[in-house]
Amino acid sequence: MLDHTLFLLLEGYAWLPERRREADGPVAHTRVMGQRAAGLCGPDAVRFFYDENHIERHTALPGLVKSTLFGHGAVHTLDGADHRVRKAMFVSVLNGDGIDDLVEHTTRAWDEAAASWAGGRSVTLFDEAARILARGVSRWAGIPLDDAEVPGLAADLVAMVDGFATVGPRHWRARAARGRREEWLGRLVRQVREGAVTAPEGSALAAVAHHRDADGELLDPRVAAVELLNVIRPTTAVAWFVAFSAHALHRWPQHRAALRGGDVSFAEAFTHEVRRFYPFAPFVGGRAVKDLTWKGEHIPAGSLVLLDIYGQNHDPQLWPDPYTFDPRRFVGREIGPYDLIPQGGGDTAGGHRCPGEAITVALLRALVVRLAQLDYDVPAQDMDISLRRVPARPASGFVISSVMSAVTDRSVVTPLHR
């Protein structure tokens, strides 16, 4: 089979859906980075992919991704009991009342920043949102950080996400950013353990610094730093969805009134539609632990198995008129573990579904209301969202000007979990 690595780099989000269209059956057989690969899609494929009897993750993540996005030794690289014990730490921190607190920290940071946007100057919403989110999640996580340090931290966290799926300058910026932040947080973990810094009780910093893995040992400070970054980095990555939300409100302004009026159910539906419609992760990968059969087709042991996230989120069998932005499709619809998968599928507690998904939903639901409650102009700019660029985002970062704040209805900031 032809190796499609170059095509993947050139085609971006369209690569795996195109390979699946070319396939004669339900599996797209190809090669990536010299390895056999099988591309799957659909709710049944999600069940199959997240079954640890079929797929393991720790051998599948390429070094390029571990050195930029996730970090070496991260929870994403574990399987079995090691994964479940480490994942439990994240679930305990990222769910429950902690979400309420994070949303409160972040919306307060948004309100402070939005007040400074007035006066006619132009601001790039993507950059502003990244700084807001970095400030909010750092405060919430118990990480001591001066306001003057926020822009640098936000830029590094954005770089780690922006460079994970490419080679060249973006990739090397991501590596450099990760090195700086792992050193910083590793030093902070050591200071917490030595008593030189006090981690707030119940904070992410305290949880990670004192966590013991399945072997009963404390995390190596570098690995602890990796996992702290895996709390604050994906939260900052919500900036992508904020920029997409602004793009959606500009293209389909009829949705602004319901958001502006504080319709909680519509804000939730709008959030889910942004996550479904706009491109973020193209696919996730694992490795076949043994010879497998999927819908009658053979997948050899050791093959890469790729779950087509972008393809599934635009599958007309799941989402009628999938390339129409329509939040109403989620009004009153319960989100299942195998249908909407922008941050992975399956079970959060025991599986590999992103433990921060509830945070993403809660933050975005609160922020899209605040965004809709702003009055602003949208100057001429390049809003193109290239599907060849992974991760995609509006080329301009979405610039707004002449901002005037509206009264914020704080009743809609309660997170999605009940």
Image: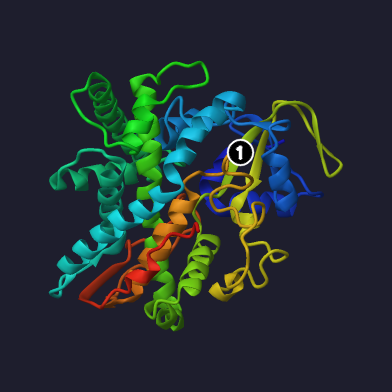
Mark 1: few/some/many CA within 10 Å (<14, 14-19, 20+): some
| 21, above or below 302, in the image | below
Q: Is residue 417 left or right of residue 243?
A: right
Q: How many tags in the picture?
A: 1
What residue would you read off at disc 1? Answer: 351
Q: How is the image coloured?
A: rainbow
* Occupied quadrant, residue 414: bottom left
Between residue 182 and residue 96, name the one nearer to us.
Answer: 96
Quadrant of the image occupied by residue 349:
top right
Is 232 positioned to the left or the right of 25 in the image? left
Q: Residue 383 at what x, y percent from top left? A: 38, 67
Of the pair 198 and 47, the residue shown nearer to us: 198
Find residue 129 and report its horizontal and vertical position in percent.
30, 58
Q: Would residue 287 be found to the left or right of residue 127 on screen?
A: right
Point 20% across, 62% down: residue? 113
Image quadrant in which the N terminus is located: top right
Rendering coords of residue 99 (x, y %): 40, 51
Is residue 60 something one can see in this rendering?
yes
Whether residue 387 sits left or right of residue 199 in the image: it is right
Using the rendered image of the protein, determine whether residue 326 is visible from the camera's viewpoint.
no
User: Which residue: 51% across, 60% down?
Assistant: 275
Q: Residue furthest right?
A: 296
Q: Please name whichever residue, 379 or 104, is drawn nearer the observer in this view of the structure.
A: 104
**Picture coordinates of residue 279 (x, y %)?**
51, 57
**174 to 278, vertically: above or below:** above
**For numbered disc 1, what is the local secondary structure?**
loop
Q: In this view, does 333 lie above or below 351?
A: below
Q: Residue at x 35, y 67 (%)?
A: 382
Q: What residue type is labelled 1?
A: Gly
